[in-house]
Image (spheres, coloured by chain):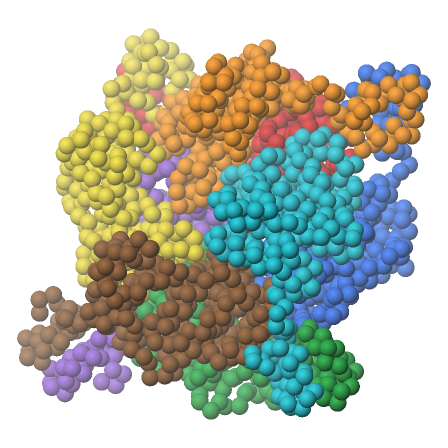
Chain colours: A cyan, B blue, C red, D orange, E green, F purple, G yellow, H brown
Amino acid sequence: MSNGWNIEELLQGVAAGRVGIEEATERLRSLPFSESPGLSLDTHRVLRLGLPEVVYGRHKNEAQIRAALEGLVAAHGCALATWVSEAHAAGLLSVFPDGEYDPTSRLFQIGRMPVPAAVKTVAVVCAGTSDLSVAEEAARTVEFAGHHALRVHDVGVAGLHRLLARLDDLKTAQVIIAVAGMEGALPSVLAGLVRPPVIAVPTSVGYGTNLGGLTALMAMLTSCSTGIGVVNVDNGFGAAMLALRIVQGD
Amino acid sequence: MSNGWNIEELLQGVAAGRVGIEEATERLRSLPFSESPGLSLDTHRVLRLGLPEVVYGRHKNEAQIRAALEGLVAAHGCALATWVSEAHAAGLLSVFPDGEYDPTSRLFQIGRMPVPAAVKTVAVVCAGTSDLSVAEEAARTVEFAGHHALRVHDVGVAGLHRLLARLDDLKTAQVIIAVAGMEGALPSVLAGLVRPPVIAVPTSVGYGTNLGGLTALMAMLTSCSTGIGVVNVDNGFGAAMLALRIVQGD
Amino acid sequence: MSNGWNIEELLQGVAAGRVGIEEATERLRSLPFSESPGLSLDTHRVLRLGLPEVVYGRHKNEAQIRAALEGLVAAHGCALATWVSEAHAAGLLSVFPDGEYDPTSRLFQIGRMPVPAAVKTVAVVCAGTSDLSVAEEAARTVEFAGHHALRVHDVGVAGLHRLLARLDDLKTAQVIIAVAGMEGALPSVLAGLVRPPVIAVPTSVGYGTNLGGLTALMAMLTSCSTGIGVVNVDNGFGAAMLALRIVQGD
Amino acid sequence: MSNGWNIEELLQGVAAGRVGIEEATERLRSLPFSESPGLSLDTHRVLRLGLPEVVYGRHKNEAQIRAALEGLVAAHGCALATWVSEAHAAGLLSVFPDGEYDPTSRLFQIGRMPVPAAVKTVAVVCAGTSDLSVAEEAARTVEFAGHHALRVHDVGVAGLHRLLARLDDLKTAQVIIAVAGMEGALPSVLAGLVRPPVIAVPTSVGYGTNLGGLTALMAMLTSCSTGIGVVNVDNGFGAAMLALRIVQGD
Amino acid sequence: MSNGWNIEELLQGVAAGRVGIEEATERLRSLPFSESPGLSLDTHRVLRLGLPEVVYGRHKNEAQIRAALEGLVAAHGCALATWVSEAHAAGLLSVFPDGEYDPTSRLFQIGRMPVPAAVKTVAVVCAGTSDLSVAEEAARTVEFAGHHALRVHDVGVAGLHRLLARLDDLKTAQVIIAVAGMEGALPSVLAGLVRPPVIAVPTSVGYGTNLGGLTALMAMLTSCSTGIGVVNVDNGFGAAMLALRIVQGD
Amino acid sequence: MSNGWNIEELLQGVAAGRVGIEEATERLRSLPFSESPGLSLDTHRVLRLGLPEVVYGRHKNEAQIRAALEGLVAAHGCALATWVSEAHAAGLLSVFPDGEYDPTSRLFQIGRMPVPAAVKTVAVVCAGTSDLSVAEEAARTVEFAGHHALRVHDVGVAGLHRLLARLDDLKTAQVIIAVAGMEGALPSVLAGLVRPPVIAVPTSVGYGTNLGGLTALMAMLTSCSTGIGVVNVDNGFGAAMLALRIVQGD
Amino acid sequence: MSNGWNIEELLQGVAAGRVGIEEATERLRSLPFSESPGLSLDTHRVLRLGLPEVVYGRHKNEAQIRAALEGLVAAHGCALATWVSEAHAAGLLSVFPDGEYDPTSRLFQIGRMPVPAAVKTVAVVCAGTSDLSVAEEAARTVEFAGHHALRVHDVGVAGLHRLLARLDDLKTAQVIIAVAGMEGALPSVLAGLVRPPVIAVPTSVGYGTNLGGLTALMAMLTSCSTGIGVVNVDNGFGAAMLALRIVQGD
Amino acid sequence: MSNGWNIEELLQGVAAGRVGIEEATERLRSLPFSESPGLSLDTHRVLRLGLPEVVYGRHKNEAQIRAALEGLVAAHGCALATWVSEAHAAGLLSVFPDGEYDPTSRLFQIGRMPVPAAVKTVAVVCAGTSDLSVAEEAARTVEFAGHHALRVHDVGVAGLHRLLARLDDLKTAQVIIAVAGMEGALPSVLAGLVRPPVIAVPTSVGYGTNLGGLTALMAMLTSCSTGIGVVNVDNGFGAAMLALRIVQGD
């Protein structure tokens, strides 16, 4: 019982009479979730949350991203990293020859998760080319998990006819991710027109009163429509993770 | 074709040759969604969004709430109003003898929606008695729609053991609504422990740096956990509406 | 030349040689706009800006409002006061028997301005009953100035079909005043659909992330549509004054 | 009826009996604005809003701006792009030899719109050289649409005499665009002196308590003068678009 | 093993061979902190944190406060409640005849904790009579825990001589709680003069740029002195709890 | 040397050889400003700052205000209290029969300070009746100190002619206090026109984007004119105290 | 009367009967401050405000700064420019061989104003080396105008003894400029100790809760001391200009 | 008595009769803390506050940092500088061959303080690699003062099991420094689990609603746990200084 944290060993000790009940009670009282030796953290996360860990590449150097990816590939046979710069991607591609890098979404991925029993459709809707980076981060994360991403672009509320022309498509989705900068009105309009839950992603696109995306964020939260859940500014990845929890929960 | 907005009449005119194709094209170009006569708005909403209209009682006087409830009961056989004061509730109960009023959640309801084919469980989790009003607004709205609300109270992050003791219960829910004031850490902790999507509701409970609930809101949005969708401060009703879209979407 | 500010008298002095050119130059250098005796300030404002002064009733007691109204009626034969409470209105009605008070808009008016040569239409659009007070303040101010106010209510972006059904009406207006609380998306949608200039009025309707109307305000300013001018939160009167400058400028 | 969105074809089907009325009703119910094949979006916008689409160059690379300009020139014979960097402009000039680039306003234009039946005057007023970039963006956009831009520079409220000396000029304008950074007092002073509607453009010029232009913005919105509509910080283009709606609305 | 949460019973089952090791491992994996039957929550808190639970009276009615106090008295022989209104206090005094109520601090207490082995001194410093309520909440909480509160009042930075005259006293304290509204400069000055750790409590005293205490808060956090820890606005109780952790940690 | 703080006694001890130099050095090192016995604090303040202490009545009850006034009258023969409610004033007038209360400024005063050798003029300028309370607080504080307050009211920037008509008067002042709500442009305009230093007082008059006076405050601080010093929102008293330091400094 | 704005010519016309009184009245009514031909703007400013125009170098290129300096030197024999970069200064020094550039304050000056009849002392106080740039901008502007700048550095409130040691020096100043970043407590402490008016300059020195200088700004405005006027963040020049108005006003 | 500030000399003068008591009283009245000649400031600080001065390297050039370090080494035999860039560190290492530079924490140190009589343990807890820089600044400052820093990394609230596994370690610390970005929930959870005082350090890690660390800051201040003192964003050094005051106060 080297490190004292292996529950199984502890129980064996109790069963064998090597460890007193009182002592074991005391140890266990402040020990909640133990890690069995050889069971990696990441696998644990899949069990607990249904989704593997993903490498957040923003504040990491190339070596750190590489090490994290290697660990995940070893455990799951696939891996995903977000916020990977083009410079880092070039280096990673030489290490992971079957890796793929998408410069728009800044995602680097190796393989993808096994196709789920029930493949669902997540619509990713955005207004303009400026929001594409965030929208692609969402769409590709959905696809990494084996689900279908339905892209609906260029449908801002200033040109409502384009949005209305795509309603039938949107009705086929189980969840809608609505990506919008500026005044952030797209989720309000969508949630008033179609039935699926709407995940709203404000973007920092705009200037002045846009306030770095806070205006869109606040507008989405105070929407006159119901059925909208909001994530952080520019957080396409987070929107996809929420969408996956929803479609995988059935 | 009295008001010019009935699509059916217009098409009959086209079919009968009474209306030229060019003229009809022109009229239809700027006419999106028509309202068939005799089809009430509220029914339309059920068709479109799967959920009936709800009376937002905050800025309405008793007569306005009463009229809205009567219209909804006539259309659906049931009705729900939010933000109903105790004074208004007293008057409404004399008009709707089978109405129910819950002072904690400030909800007034008449009947409830038909039990769905598949009843789902929505957990409503909150930290303290101060958040109860918002939590009950969520739980009772879920129940009004015929689903099961699992109440898990008194589980703030300052006393983590109480929360951990309820994990098994929480794992039975399809969606978790996490209501939290002050620093709003509850959804982060929950989303790291269990699998269902988490709808976070910041409350205005607290003072000073609580900033009327904005601190909890911002904290929930910038969570280190993924799988969280956030709604407006104190918006228990909105959280329930999002939860219903999720559980009814299967 | 009693008070030294009458330009005409001063020039007569110069013409008559009573006042030296140097002295007159000096006096005039720092004297911009003189008030001819007997010419009231309010009349001056009509000449300068095309619209008479209006009594801002918010911080005034009943006696102050009454005195201001009497002065305006004496000068113009009509008068308008904003932010008049019901209590003050009761007292004013006993003094001005031909006055009218509208409790929704809190406007008190006596008569109205002469009908303009060209009567124009100003549309006043709003989403819900909660915005009615602000919308009526705008509409009635437009009517006080002799123009036509086209009221289009209950057309929020959560129920887009109702808005789209009124587009033809809106196309008849010279200016559109769009009143919206919550996320304030109405002006964006309108300005993308129809041609007239849109004056956006954010309202303080909502709670939490509504931020007392600032969210709607910021959203309107960062709109993805062009052709929108924004006024202060809840400032229906200000929107009407801008609309009047536009329609009277032709 | 290949894509199902051509209203004309659909009506021909109805007239010919190929499409049932019920089916057509259903299709049209959720189809608002159709796009006839071969009719470009941009032309549609001119019909709907009276002004062609403009290329927002900020987040676009040179190839994207070029493609957009080519499309617009093909449709209208002229085109305008905003926020074009000097580097991009150099490349564009080699493709569009008759293009013009103004480094102050960052506008790139090819030709201009046909001279309107009634040419109007839009005054563009600003305080200092620091606001010139925003002011020129407004003035040149007005000129692109064939109207007259009256430039009135160097008239800040700290040197009121210079402003007052230009009042007669300002009275000849149908609309005044007032560009101001720092405390943003210029529109208040102008709107108190002259009759046309005032479009206020706050600029981000200043530091510290300027708050990136928000102080000027807020000051303009809470002005003690009436008749002012405000646009986003630094949004000279938006101010011009609003001015054009006003002068073209007569 | 009725409720499945008693660790001791579970281990007895393992020891007796009634529960398999695998099953027990599984149960324990998601069970962190168990509650032995009959062990009250509040006692647990004393063990865990060294301080008993305190009743936060702000959002509770008199019956709720009374029930909580009764529970705490039963467990510990003493109890403290914060934010108790004078009205509630009157009722509580009739139930707890040996209770004490201090209207300045709004604290209601029954008895006090046993005198600690080592009584320490906590200085509570404030500038003016306006900060007294917050200062007394801190001082009396310290005294409830059996330590010595040294009150140093009326020593604002605008009259520095009064503060300097008390330095020798302050040097006798183990911790200094500095309560200050307005610009909140007191902790900076104190931490530059004397050696103990300084707990800074901003108060909401002031108006305008005081921003409800946020100005003092921010100033304290950005102090040019080191050795300052800040708590929430007006949170005298929280300051005392931090002070108690410091003095009881030795 | 009873209390150890009397410098004089200490020095007598040194001179007499009763106190060693080392000991005295040590005592004096941490003793900055001593209070001679019998010398009241308030008198000290006059010596130090040239102005007596004033009673800040906002958070004090009638008894506290009364006691403070009695102390000041005893020391100086006159006294001033700010923020005195009408209710408190009634009680104070029965105690101080020669007291004066001004309900507009909420000042209560007993006598006034001796007329200074050189009486100076402080202009107090404001825009509208809504700012009168703050302006009067400034003007009467100036008069309490024996200087001349020149009141210039009703001169907002929306009606510039009225302001320009009073320029000659303003040029006679040593200091100008400019009180302004809404967009707060008055000090900018004044400082561009006349020579004395301008003390700007933002007021909380307005609504919405006025932000409780912060918009005016920020605008005044980011003014394009120089020569302006700003005080807190609504702080007429503080403006007068700064003006007095300026005029008494000669 | 070429441009119609020369008052003198106009009056000569009236005196000679060439211009009718009515016509002249009309012209003068909207003409406030005329510019005599040949009288430069800058000279006008000296007459009006007692201080010459200063070149604000921040948004200007070298050619613009040079032209402005040349104009000012021609009119006054001396000139001052603020916010001049080292690169621009190098170029300017080759044009103005008797120019001086100070890299700390970023001021470029040519000569200085004539020594005033009464030279006054302005103390410039700051806490640390980080605030030196702003402090020097203030001190050198004071010296440019011929007055005495008393520099008192390194006297932050965290080391109060250094500040107290300089009090006698500070008492010799007519005005004190207190420059402070971080929590901005220096002016509060100073204004409580000495008699002259205090001009507070917040600086952007600090990080995090410093909020770019806004924390210091707000703290200075809500000071518990009176007699403080605040200027914009980092605005050392503005502080000097206010100080000059004060000392030149005697 | 050259500079008049040497207390000792002054007292010798009194004792010798060379200085009158009245004169000496007057001088001493405004002289609080004197500096004996030859006694360096830094030594004074150790006496006063128990900790030597530290060089804040952020706004200093290499020469300034070097000079400050030399002074401190001369006085104490050791020295510490914060915020030292890698470039500056390279130069400093050539001057101080026994210096150490840590690029993660940006600390440069020469030697360390003498080992205290009682060495205490300060735990430094953080969530992820992104917070390491701030955590190391805290840990190494603690170690510079001779105490023990217990590093507990990678324990964010999204993976609660890792945190719970380290509780026993944390219970051995006298103080816990909890470093957290994003939603800043770590201190709340810790303070609910263990007994020592918790010093919370918000970091600027995150984006969007993270608001540069303000969200974490506000969340920490409004925590539902008690026993937490908060320092500025990213201020690891400040947290250590507070911890040192606590552990050295016993």
For image coordinates 90% across by 33% down, the residue present is B37
User: Where, by quadrant of the figure, is residue D15 drawn?
Assistant: top right
Using the image, determine if residue H49 lies above or below residue F144: below
- Which quarter of the picture shows residue H64? bottom left
Q: Residue at x 42, y 42 (%)?
A: D210
Please report the residue visible at 51 percent of the width from the left and 78 percent of the height from the top: H169
Residue drawn at point x = 48 percent, y = 58 percent: H130
Q: Nearer the viewer, residue A51 or E236?
A: A51
Image position of D16 (left or right of H84): right
In the displayed structure, does residue H218 sit left or right of residue H30? right
Residue A229 showing in the rendered view: no
Residue H109 in the image: above or below residue C113: below
Q: Of B53 and A164, which appears nearest the observer?
A: A164
Quadrant (top left, top right, bottom left, bottom right) of the N terminus of chain A: bottom right
Across and down, in percent, residue A73 comes to 61, 56
Q: Which quarter of the rendered picture does the C terminus of chain A lie within? A: bottom right
